[in-house]
Image: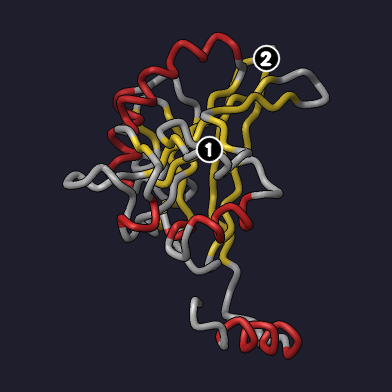
Amino acid sequence: NHEFDYGLERVRDATSRFLTVSANTEAPPGVLPGLRPWIILTTKDGIRILVFGLIQIEPGNNLPSTHPDKVKGFRFTDPLAKARELRKLRSSADIMIALTHLGYDQDLALAREMPELDLIIGGHSHTRVDPAESPAESRVNGVLLTQAAADNRYLGRIDLLLRDGRIAEKKGRLIDLGRPMEEDPVLKAAIAEYRKNPAL
């Protein structure tokens, strides 16, 4: 949601080199040219991994958590309703992953509604979900839920073991990245330059 905070020009610049996946987002013409509702990635062994994205919307205005002026021309639909429409894609992939920015409560709701999912990689609520520590809390309907808190404190690792093209085992854990590292003087100087820009 915060990609929108600095306006559409900045969104276009930031995403011009990357594919963006969000099934419940429709962008104005010329903005987010790499936007796709879902993609299928195929491994060298021929395993098909379907990934779809979802962004949260606020109940009052059906917009993500950003200033409404920053998303003029965009259309956002209910993420859980949109996810249900994607159930039909399950047969086209060996692994189905939801890449969400909904918050942990909505990820739980998604897992309850869509047992077709293998995995939810979540964000937005900055929740620390460590499946290795609390496996019961990180699995709903057989769906593995993950979220790595915030501020680069943890790195999430997910291991999927496949047998005969089907997931036989799935595990997740958080890797503690430890205390903040010393500041890099070159990077610190670059940040200082950005901060001189009133838009930032």
Contact (CB < 8 A) between labels 2 and 1? no
Compared with 94, 119 (above or below) is: below
Dot 1, crowdedness within 10 Å: few (<14), some or many (≥20)?
Answer: few
Which residue of the protein is positioned furthest toward the right in this rendering?
44
Check disc 2 and give the amino acid type. Gly
Dot 2, crowdedness within 10 Å: few (<14), some or many (≥20)?
Answer: some
Q: Where is residue 55 drawn, in percent x and y?
A: 40, 43
For the residue pair 121 and 194, the one nearer the viewer reads as 194
Question: Which circle's residue, 2 or 1, is located before the other in the chain?
Answer: 1
Q: Secondary structure at mark 2?
A: loop
Q: Residue at x 30, y 40 (%)?
A: 106
Q: Where is residue 46 drawn, in percent x and y?
A: 77, 18
Q: Where is residue 43 drawn, in percent x and y?
A: 76, 26
Q: Residue at x 58, y 80 (%)?
A: 180
Mark carried by residue 166:
none
Q: Residue at x 76, y 86 (%)?
A: 186
Q: Which residue lies under the disc numbered 2?
A: 165
Compared with 70, 113 (above or below) is: above
Distance from disc 2 to disc 1, alpha carbons, whole Å, reads: 39 Å
Q: Looking at the rendering, which quadrant does residue 154 occupy? A: bottom right
128 left or right of 14 in image? left
Compared with 51, 12 (above or below) is: below
Q: Looking at the rendering, which quadrant does residue 194 occupy? A: bottom right
Q: Which residue lies under the disc numbered 1?
A: 29
